[in-house]
Image: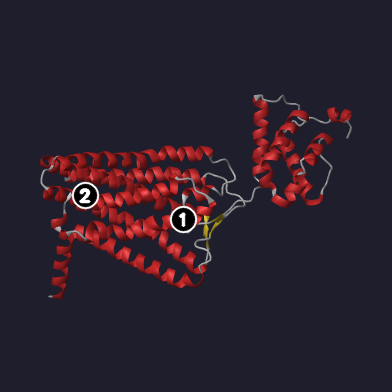
Amino acid sequence: MSNENLHKAPRCDDVSECALQFYRWCINAQEDGRSDCPRCTHTRSLVAKADVKDHLALLSLNVCIERLTFFCEHMIETIMRVERNTPQFFWYKGVIVAMLNQNQTKVTEILLLGFQNQGNIKVPFFLLIVVIYIMTVCESSLVIGLVSSTKKLQSPMYFFLQQLALSDLLQTSTVVPEMLRIIINEGATMSLFGCITQFYFFAASEAFQCLNLAVMSYDRYVAICIPLRYTSIMSNNVCVKCILMSWSLAFDIILITANAAAAQNFCEKYIIDHFFCDFFPLLELCCSDTFFVRVEVTLLSVPVVFTPFVLVIVSYVCIAHEILKIESTTGRQKAFSTCSSHLAVVSIFYGTLIGIYVVPSKQQLMTISKLLSLLYTLIIPFANPMIYSLRNRDIIEQLKIILIHRND
């Protein structure tokens, strides 16, 4: 087609028809190398110069969307004769790009690789995870049952411990059963919906733990720094409201995050080198721009991660200042013992989160990332009941009473 005929080419009054013709030509180019551009040789030459046919054949269409978008801009300007950088230009471009995106292969299943190259340790590792999971469920259920059924344990501290055990139970039950299937099969598939659902419940339990640990640190601050007002400040009504607000805030904010992840375009890439569906590995599968999603998640993490962390730091600074005022060594040790377990768990919990989500992840550190994830998805929920509760004198006494009554 000559340049003279180019200007005589019929105008594309229907933008959808024009975009569809250009789109079909691009697809045909990858299939059989057709060169009968429906509008002009100029567009065809642009495609040929960028070797789009080779790219489409080797990399598939969605990888070339950026280049195809560039061709769309030229098509709108040269064929449709719409001036560049005008509202009409951007509208046409949006319609064409949307049609190009429709051809992308939509991912419906995710492949989780888990722990690769386990060799002879696969079965022992599987059995170890099973034993730890069973013990975690038993420990957490025991704490929940004892606090619920024993009047002596009806205090704010034990109420918060009960909620911590409940979140540990939710977290491990969300991750571990699927992880066991991945380990024994050396990788397993999960539906995209199931993957996002797993992330939702796992992240909600993690967010609640951040908030609950902050509430517990405030409880310890009141108990040590202003003990005479402890009963009035940490009343039953206040404790219940704090927990309800923590659960509600955790689930609501993570729901926004999960919806943001579900709204992304997942195409072609479907492999996650992990043993569960975490947020950032899931975002790596997106073929759409995730910058604003990452910014949104960072902002949403402020009320459920950073603010509780600051509250924990401030509480323990005040507690340390108050403990240093105590003259007797025995008094200092007694005051410190009431919050030492909480401080240890907070350090491990936030240290692990920082190691995974704050420190930039690198491919060569994927094994370390998996081990850290294993620490806070399995080991910490397993250790929490022992650190907090099963070393507690009141809980041990109530457990002995129950066992004695059963034997009688």
Q: Residue at x 70, y 50 (%)?
A: 59
Scheme by which the image is coloured: secondary structure
Query: Horizontally, is 331 left or right of 292 in the view?
Result: left
Left or right side of 269 for 225: left
Instruction: Residue at the far bottom: name it.
Output: 408
Q: Secondary structure at mark 2?
A: helix
Taking the spot 57% from the left edge, 40% from the top edge, the residue there is 289
Q: Is residue 267 left or right of residue 121?
A: right
What kind of residue is marked 2? Answer: Cys
Quadrant in which residue 395 is drawn: bottom left
Q: Characterize the local packing of mark 1: few (<14), some (14-19) or many (20 or more) Cα atoms within 10 angstroms.
A: some
- Number of residues whose C-alpha sits closer than 10 Å to that of mark 2, classed few (under 14), some (14–19) or many (20 or more): many
Indicate which disc, 1 or 2, sits on the residue closer to the N terminus.
Answer: 2
Q: Residue 46, percent across and down?
A: 79, 37
Task: Locate the C terminus and report the quarter of the image it occupies.
Answer: bottom left
Quarter of image, res 223: top left
The reply to whether residue 125 is in sight is: yes
Of the numbered discs in the image, which one, if any, rests on residue 254?
Answer: none
Task: Say which of 195 and 321 sits in front.
Answer: 321
- Mark 1 residue element: helix
Vertical comparison of 384 with 249: above or below: below
Q: x%, y% of residue 331?
A: 12, 48
Going 11% across and 50% down the picture, which residue do you hit? 330
Residue type, mark 1 in image: Ile
- Residue 233 in picture, x, y percent from top left: 16, 40
Please name the residue that numbered disc 1 is placed on: 368
Label number found at residue 339: 2
User: Which quadrant of the structure image shows residue 172?
Assistant: bottom left
Q: Looking at the rendering, in which quadrant would you find the N terminus?
A: top right
Q: Is residue 234 visible?
A: no
